[in-house]
Image: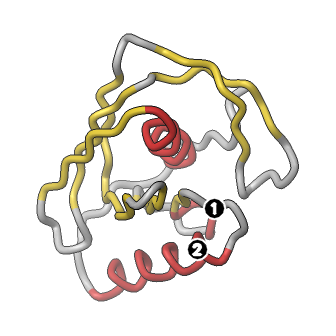
Amino acid sequence: MAEPVTVFDKQLRQLVKSLTLTMRSAVGGAGLAAPQLGVPLRVLVYNYDGRAGHLVNPRLELSERTIVADEACLSAPGQWRALERAFAVTARGRDMSGKPVTVKAIGMLARILQHEVDHLDGVVIPL
């Protein structure tokens, strides 16, 4: 399980930049969590359908409505699983400067955020 970020400094900004560059260089990469790069901190980045950003110490509020869809992971190339996820989420956390951030998402972006938070909780692809 990834540790909460407590220091918002140059190293954190470099981590967010590295995560973003790595995600963008991966074919089909729409999100990436710090543990996927071997950094055990609660940091994720996302980029889907014109919405891109990052969250530090994210917490998710999940809708009751769920949807089942196929999902893949950059950590397990070529593996797909049908997973049930909340259709909508409100993600609250901080940006790399420590300022509060709220991201409201539905559909695929909601799925991406849930997937990346799973990584922060030590889960690669839920079975």
Viewer-nearest residue: 118 or 54: 54
Give the numbered dot on residue 29: 1
Specify whether 12 is left or right of 110: left
Dot 1 lies on which element? loop
Residue 51 lies in what quarter of the image? Answer: bottom left
Q: The residue under label 1 is which amino acid type?
A: Gly
**Label pair 2/1, CB-CB below 8 angstroms:** yes
Which quarter shows the C terminus? top right
- Residue 117, position as x, y percentages in the image: 47, 43
Q: If you read the primary sequence from the N terminus, does the residue marked by circle 2 or circle 1 appear first? A: 2
- Mark 1: give few (<14), some (14-19) or many (20+) Cα within 10 Å: some
Residue 89, relative to residue 67: is it above or below? below
Q: In the rendered image, which residue does mark 2 sit on?
A: 24
Residue 104, relative to residue 32: is it above or below? above
Viewer-nearest residue: 85 or 3: 85
User: Label 2, label 1: how many angstroms apart (C-alpha)?
Assistant: 6 Å
In this view, the residue farthest toward the left is 99
Residue 24, relative to residue 103: is it above or below? below
- Residue 90, position as x, y percentages in the image: 27, 35
Q: Residue at x 33, y 34 (%)?
A: 60
Specify whether 73 is left or right of 118: right
In this view, the residue farthest toward the top is 64
Q: Residue at x 20, y 47 (%)?
A: 102
Residue 59 lies in what quarter of the image? Answer: top left
Q: Residue at x 51, y 44 (%)?
A: 112
- Residue 6, position as x, y percentages in the image: 24, 64
Viewer-nearest residue: 95 or 71: 71
